[in-house]
Every structure is written in C-alpha cells, then in structure tokens.
Image: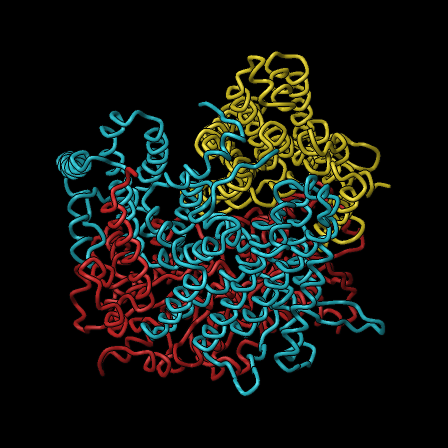
Amino acid sequence: MTPIGTDEWVAEAEQRRQGDSGPLAPLRRGLMRVPPVGRLALLVAGAGLLPVLSDSTFVVRVGLNALLFALLALGLNVVVGYAGLLDLGFIAFYGMGAYTYALLSSDQLGLHWPTELAILTAVLATVVLGYLLGLPSRRLLGDYLAIVTLFFGQAFVQLVTNVDRLPLPGGRTLDLTGGPNGITGVDQFRLGMLHLRTVQDYYWLLIVVFALAAVVFFNADNSRTGRAWRAVREDPLAAGALTIPVNRLKLLAFAVGAGTAGLAGTVFAAVQLGVFPANFTVTLLIMVYAAVVLGGTGSIPGVVLGAAVISVVPEILRDPDLSRFLFYGVMVSTLMVLLRPWRVLAAVLVATVAFGFAIRGLVDWVWPGELIEAGGGGGKVADALGSWVVMTPGNVLVINLAFVALIAAVLTLTTLRPAVRHIGLPAVLYLSAFVWENRLVTDPSITRQLLLGVILVVMMNVRPHGLLGEPRVEIT
Amino acid sequence: MSLFLQLLINGVTLGSVYALIALGYSMVYGILKLLNFAHGEVYMIGAFIGYGVLTAVGGPAAPVVPVWLLVIGMVVVAMLGSGVLGVIIERFAYRPLRNSPRIAPLISALGVSFFLQASALLLFTARIRSYDTTEFISLGTGVDIGPARISLVRLLAIGTAVTLMVALTVLVRQTKLGRAMRATAHDREAAAMMGVDVDRVIVATFFIGSALAGAAGVMVGLVFGRIFHLMGFVAGLKGFTAAVVGGIGNIPGAMLGGLLIGLGEALAAGYISSTFTDLIVFGLLIAVMLLRPRGLLGTPAVDKV
Amino acid sequence: MKSSPRQSLGVLVLVVVAVAASACGGGESTSTDDATAVPADTDVAMTAEEPAGPTSTEAAAASSAMASPTATGAASGAAVDCGGAVGVMGPFTGDAASIGQEQLNWATFALDRFNTDNGTDFTLAEGDTQLDPAQATTVAQQFISDQEIIGVVGPAGSQEVEAIGPIFDGALAFVSPSATSTDLTDGSIEGFFRVVPRDDVQGPTDAEYMISELDAGNVLIIDDQTSYSTGLADSVAQTLQDSDVTVDTDSVNQDQTDFSSLVSAIGDDVDVVFLPWQIAANAQVFAQQMTEQGKQATIFGSDGLFSPDDFTADGAYVSSFAPDIRGIPEDEELVTAYTEEYGEFGTFGPPVYAAMQAVLTAATTTCEEGEPSRDAVLAALPETSIDNSILGGTLTFDSSGDIEGADFFIFQIQDGEYTLVQ
C-alpha cells in the first residue's frame, strides 16, 4: 500500500478517467458523451414508456415509487452532494410536506384548500423548517451536524406520533396528527381542470415534476451558486477567504433540499390518500442516502440511477422466483467479470456442477431418503437445481451453520491469492446455492434485507464514489 | 427524595450501558474519523452471544456453573465474540475504503448493519428472547440506599461498566498500545512515520470498542431481560449521541456523555412524561451543541492545520 | 482498457433482462398482457414467468408432509380441483417482526393443513409491509395486479387497512387477523373483514372488570404509541372516566429498553396499571421492574399480552377474545402440530389460522361451479361459517365484516398459569 499525495492524485485525474474500467465503463463513457438535454430526454422517454408497456398497476406503482425516490435523492443531493452537509434529518422534510398537505386537504382540521395553494403552503413550510434546521450548521461541523439532524428526524416522527391529544384551554383536546393512526381521507390533486385519480395520473405528474427539478438543479450546479457550493464543500475556510458567503450558501442548500423533499411529500400524501408516522422512518432515510451515494454523490444522472436501483431491486426481491433468477444471474455475471480467461470460468463452473453432484450423491448414499426435491413446480430451473442441491428444509441447525460458514468462506475467499481462490470457489458456490435454496428462498422478506446490505457493502468496496460519480479526494 | 434517588439509580444503570457503547463509537472516530454505524449491531450480537452462553450452560433456571462464574463467562465470551466481529467488519467493510470520500464507509456501515440485522433475524428468528435473570439472581437481593433500593443485578452491571472503563483508561494511558493509539488518533501519518503500526492499532481499537459494546449487550440482557434483532438501532443512536455530547473522539467524554444521557432519560421519564423522553434528550443535545459545538470535553475546534 | 466489450455487454444484457423481468413482476404468475409487454425477452425471462407461489409454498407443503406422514394419502381422497393463491401481508421484518413472523408461520400452517385436508391446491404469496402503510400500498398493488390471488389475509395494522382500502376498493376481499380499530368496519372500506373483535368490545369489558372486580379507583394507562394501543387506551379511559375513576395516562416507545424510571414514577395510590401493549415481552420487563421497586399496583394487560411464554407476571390480569386455545380439547392436535413445526406462539398467530380458514373455505365453496375467483370469494365470505373454529365456537361475519358474537375473556396469571376468571 503506497499512499499517494493529494497533488499527485489530482494530477492523475484525467489519466484515471480514461483508464476508467469495469463492466459499466462503456455505459458510463457512452452516457457522458450524450449532452445533458439528451440524457434527460432519454430518461423521460424511458420512464414514459413504462405505463405504455405494462398495464399492471403494480409496475406503475413501483415506477412511481422510483420517481418519488429520485426526487428525494435530487433534493438530498443538493445538501450532501453539492454543499457537502451531512443532513440526517432529511426525511422529516418529506414528512413535513406530506403532513402539511394532509392537514390542509382533509377532514382532520376540516380544511380543503385548493390543491395549488395547499402544495405551495406545504413547500413553503418545509423550506422554512429546512432553514431553521440549517441554522445550527453555521456552527456545527460535519458529524456534529449529522447527530443533531438525525435526532431532529427522530423527533419529528415522535412528535407526529404523539400530538394527537394536545390539551386545549377549556379541557378539550385537539387531535392534530391522528397519532399512530395518521391522517386518512386526504384529497387527491385537482390542478386546474385536471383531477388526478389513478396511480398512472400521478406517475405522469411526477415525470413532469422530476424533469423540471432535474433541469433546475442541473443549471444550479453549473451556475455561480453551484460553483460556490462546491467551494464550500471542498474547503469552507478557503471559500470564506474568497468572500463566498459560506453560511448563507449552507442555509440555501438546506432550504432547497427541504423544499424538494416537501414537494415530494405532498405528492406522496395524495397518492397514498393518507399520511402515517410509520411512513417517515430512518429506514427510508437510509435508503435515500444509499441511492445518492450508490449512484454517485453530486452527479444528477448518478443519483437518478441510484434511486432506480434502490427502489426497484427490493421489489424484484419480493418475488421468490425473480429473486432466485437475480441471485444466480448476478452470481454468474460476477464470475464472468472476475474470472479470466474464459478457460478459468469454464473450469470453475464445471467443477461447481461436478462438486454439487458428488456431494448430492454422497449425502444420498449416507442418509438415503432424507432429501426432498427442491421447490418443484418452479419449472426447469428449479427442477434442475432440485437434483443438484441437497435439500433439507427442516434441518434448522444445519442450515444456520451453513449460513454462517458461507459468510466466513466468502470473506476468506476475498483475501486469498487468485490461484487458491479458484480452487475454493466451487465449494463456496455450492454452499451459497445450498443456503439459498434451503433457507433464503423460503423467506423472501428477510432475504431482501440481507441482499440489500450485501449490495451496499460490495458497491462501496468496488466503487466508493458511486456508479456514475467522479472520483475525488477529500482534503482534510 | 426517594423518587429522585430511585431515578438516579435507574439513570446511572442506563447511563453506564450507553457509556460502554459510546466508547466504541468514540474510539473508532478518534482514530479513523469514521462513524461506525454498525456498532449498534455489534452490541446486539453481543447480547445474543451472552444468551447463547446462558443456554449452553443449562439455561437460566438450572445453570450448571455458579452464578458468578456464569456472569463472568457471559461477559467475557460476548466481549471476545463481539471484538472479533468488530475486527472482521473493519477488515472487510472499512479498510478497503480508508482513502475514499468520507460518506462511502458510512454507507458501507449501514450495509453491514442491515446485513447483521437480517442475519440475526434469520439465525435467531424474530422471537424476543429473555435472559430471565430473576431465575438465577433474585430481584429481592440488593443494597438499600435510604428509601431507595439498588438491586444486585444493577450493582453488577454498574460494577462491570466501571471496571471496564478503568481498565480502558489504564490501557490508553499506561501501555505501549495505548500510546500508539493516542499517537494515531492525533495524527495518523505522523504516527506511521514514527514507526507505529497503524493497521495494528486500528484493529486493536476495533477489537476493544466492539468488545465493550458486547459487554454492554450482556448487561442489557441481564438488567432489562429483553433481547431482539433490532435492539441495536436505538441503543446505537443513544450511544452515538452520548459520544457526541461528551466530545466525539474523547474517551472520558464518552463516559460522561453516556451518564448524562442516561440520567436525562431517567429524570425526564420520572418527572415529566415518558412519551417525549427522546424529545427532551434531543433538547439537551441541542443545548450542549450550541453552547459547546465540540461536545463537553471535546478539544476546541482547530479549523485548519 | 482490459475489460473486453463483450463481457461488459453480457452484464448489460443481464441487467436489462432483470429489469424487464421485474417489469412483469407484478403479474408474474399469470397476466398474459404483461408477457406480451416484453415480447423481445427470450427464454431467460420466461423462466421468471413461472408461477410465483408454488416454489416457496410447495417446499413448505413438502416439509409439513414430512411432519405428518399420512398427509399424501388423505389428499387423494377429495377430487375437487380447486386452487388459487392467497396473499398474506404482515410485518415480516422490521420493528414488529416478532408478530409478523408468527403470523406468517400460522398462515403457512393453516394453508398446508387446509390443502391436505381438502385435497385443494391453494398457494401462498407473501408481502412484507414492515407495518408501514406505504409498503402496504405497494404490496396491495402487487396483489391486485396478480390475477392468481383470489383473497388476502392481512394486513396486521389498522392504519395499513386504512391505507390499502382504496386500492382493493371492493375488488379483492381481505381478512385482517389483528386490526382492531373501531371505525374500520363503519362501512367506509369495502371487502374488509376481520376475525378479531373491535376495540370498543375489549375496552369496556376490561374497564368494567377493573371497576367491579378490582375496585379500581385510580388507574394508570400506558400505551405503546401504536395504533392498536392508543385505540384501546382511549376506549378504556372513556369507560373508566364515565364511572368517575381517576385516570392518568403516559406512553412508551415499543423499542424502549428500560421502563424503570416510568415505574419509579407510579404513585402509591395507583390501583391498576393498564398496559394495552403489542409486545408481551415488554410487559414482562415492566412487571419485573415493578417487583424490583416494590410497586403494589395490579397489572392489567390487553390481548396483546396474552402470551403464556412471554408474559408470566404473578397476579396480573390479561384479557383475550378467545378462550386459551391451548385449553380447547378440539384444538389440542392443532396446537401440538404447530408447536412441533414452528415452536411457541403468542396471541397474534391463531387468528391468522381462522382468517386463512375463512378465505379458503369461501374459495372452496365456489369450486363446484368452477375455478374460484375474487368475486366469488367476496360473495361467499359473508355467508361463510366455520364450525369449531380455532378461536372456539362458530365463526361467522356480520354484515359490516366484523366477527359475530365476539366476547372477551379475562384471565389471571398465577405461577405462570393462566386461569379463566371471567
């Protein structure tokens, strides 16, 4: 390990970009050659095709979630990516927008404001809240800001869960937020003549909103303000010395991010026809952060890609068959990328198959009749797997041990020399198939979480600056 | 007065748990400037290891070893297990990211956290387990302090925490490893130039920090009885807060912060309402942060070196 | 540089196929329109088109067949060709996973037993909601898009029922095993049924028992900030206050580790502490800390605490909408079979069995006339009647979707034993 100095690192930037390798490199280079307007057009066209291609409302719903996610990620990107502020209370703004809209457009307070006015008020309220939360950022640095904002997010959820019995003068109580039951019966959007009713309607609306936001943020990034943000991010002290108004820029970033989240929140409230405290938990915050970092902090196409991955992959993993398909697909494709030349790949695959049949035969011979065919009814793939993988679904202890052994084996493999690794690979592959077929496939809900964790760790290890992000060093 | 004393006891018990967790956060942060968000999960695994030991020696109702040995065994095994887990996490999730943007290890830590939670759900199922401490340490035994009583389990927990903290302080102040740790925390590159094996110091830090979290897990199991796969999140958050309040990176600060948060929670729940405990603690945090942006015992900010 | 374009292309194709496959994820099992939507995809995508449910459920069915060797023989007896998928939604991960996993186990268990007993071929599709209404709406959309699914068991939380009501909108019947909020069955949500009684049945029963039998003059109510808990707390507080009982309230967070300071603050004049909590293990900690600090007040728990394995506080009272199913002779075999396969259980599991049974029974009655459909299940559910239901007695629904003749029983705990006292 030879640590290199910052100057050298910066000097090599161009060289590194040209040497950008990895399976997605051509895609990345190709994408970067398309002008920004073209990129946006491509994306909007792609997103617009979805409801045309599929009339399943679930697919559109997942698309809608992805767009909401992308909008949130765009907002967070301003705070974290441009201005470099670790804001862990971001989801509270999303909740604030949703709750404000819900309060102004439901029977909770008996108010039914016109949609435009309600949205405007909700966004303004979140902007103000964002500004207020940004105030400590003038004094607090980095991780101290992180903890204050994180607690703010927690406090928001606790507050809306509990202000359903506010004591009023006169012994009466006011139910402001509905407590854990939330606010239901929220009005749908009526924008002018348009009454948005179905998921599709909101999907179209979100495409428009998203495109507008992307354009605005893209231009902001390339404006005076955007450059100033970057200066603040890289070195607040130097930026201040150059007469850049550091504090005002930080507050601006907070307010803009909050407003975007608030806007997304109003749409969310209208789609869900209600708001509940459980909608705005830390889990969601983590997912949005993951989307931003996975895609590449500071890069608009990056965070959009990240949002798509983070919101679509868990939905794929809901379905046992699709997740099995994804699992083996990713496994084989990873091997294709990692194992070169093709001879090695072929050898490992053949060895894995042979190893499997050998183990299967051995187990059959030692404990005859103990095995059960794999998940039948799953078609050719499942049948094939069933005659290859040892199935012992009831044997919790063995499966748990295998699971732990698998983690240990995979971790060990990554530390070995390639030649040795290739020898161990077939056994590990077989072990992972065993664990998958016996345990993971029967518990899709847990598997989802497990794989999400793995994806985050692996992605950060492989590309710490995200899929489409620019590598950069931080000057400390 | 009796209520106040009782709340004080409750607060100190809770605070010593928070302090142990905060120490891990603080030590790692001091050396790597890394927020180890998976720390709460290490604590959770520690609690489960303690439960495993308890079950292995015959369960709470009929342990085959004397109670004092059982408790020591649980704490020691959990500390070793958690320590090793911490080292593994560092080796595979953080070390490759040491020269990356600061947020990358943060996400990697969240990934580890998800993974460990889901693994615990898979291995131990979602059932809430109980140490059933009352089966082997009677609730009735304890020391009376005026009108309030401090039970044996609580004494045990506080005692363990204090012992561990004293040991840690001695280690950091007096030993060669401690000196290397302080040097690394002060300036990693300079320490490396002076011949300190930085990698070894980092591994040691992770081991010690995680071991303390493991001990905290067992203590929570013993005193509060209830362990489950998601217990790490809230505890981790509180530990993190404690570390920040005390001045992150500062070891006595973490202890002080933990104690303060514990006491704050106890007094808030006892005198005001348990509904808004977290909000009150949040208020406390904001106040400390605004008065002393670097935490209570944190060194004043040096903006540029 | 070193990465050959061909390999990269391979990865790309895989990613594209995966995304495309996900696009048909909604109707993965059947909907032909979806299949035509992605015509370009080759056999790889077709693999993903295989029915969704069977893989997981048949493995489970197989495992249950292993547990009871006679099962296969019995199955061939009935000749009715009857099948379809039942969607099960619940908090299988997240904060309430301990409840959700128990519910999922009971759902699988109920489905397997029904299939072997009746020779039917129903399958199960699970949807994890994490008790988050937003996730519940996504799952609901997935279920409604999947034409295989003829009925739904779940969701667990009242707020989730509120959220998904407009999505199902009377097109798909859903039977909740645990949503008790009173206004869910006021007619605003179509196609909704539940096998547990409303809060306004349990609340007054508990409150009246506190007044008449426990002579409570001062009651402390502590809710756990969930929709289940606040509903009950309000209902009990209302009845108590109507009888001039002094009521104080406080609340805790479900994830809280320590209740000792709240316990310290309990005054000596408090007669009864009412805990309408979801997680019985929490109440056990609370009770122990009361003993530790020498507090004399009686603990009264709602049905969430009815869990002989987790909650054993001496002298405490617990209400339950069913007599303990471990005490019903007809259920003995059932309880043994379940415990053998899945281990111990609390209060949230058995209602899932009843809910699953109701959906499947409704679906089966329509089998004579052909394949079960959503409409058929919707039409049959109000007429469905299950004799000797797991919850005791005959299970039928009234016109608003509530369970008929719901009564609450009250138990006292002595030395870990639950004794029926009312």
Inspect this view and state whether residue B216 appears: no
Is residue A358 toward the left or the right of residue A63 in the image?
left
Q: Is residue C172 above or below residue B118?
A: below
Q: Toward the viewer: C22 or C406?
A: C22
Q: Residue furthest bottom?
A: A193
Seen at 80% across and 37% down, the residue is B148
Q: Position of residue C167 (x, y in %)?
A: 45, 76
Inspect this view and state whether residue C199 appears: yes
Q: Is residue A387 above or below residue C373?
A: above
Seen at 22% across and 81% down, the residue is C370
Count all numbered tags in the image, as a single digit: 0
Q: Toward the viewer: C212 or B214?
A: B214
Is residue A405 toward the left or the right of residue B264 in the image?
left
Locate the N terminus of chain B and report the quarter of the image it occupies.
Answer: top right
Q: Residue furthest right?
A: B1
Chain A takes which shade in the image? cyan
Q: Toward the viewer: C406 or C165?
A: C165
Q: Toward the viewer: C83 or A83?
A: A83
Chain B takes which shade in the image? yellow
Q: Which chain is tinted red?
A: C
Which colour style is shown?
Answer: by chain
Q: Is residue A131 above or below residue C241?
A: above
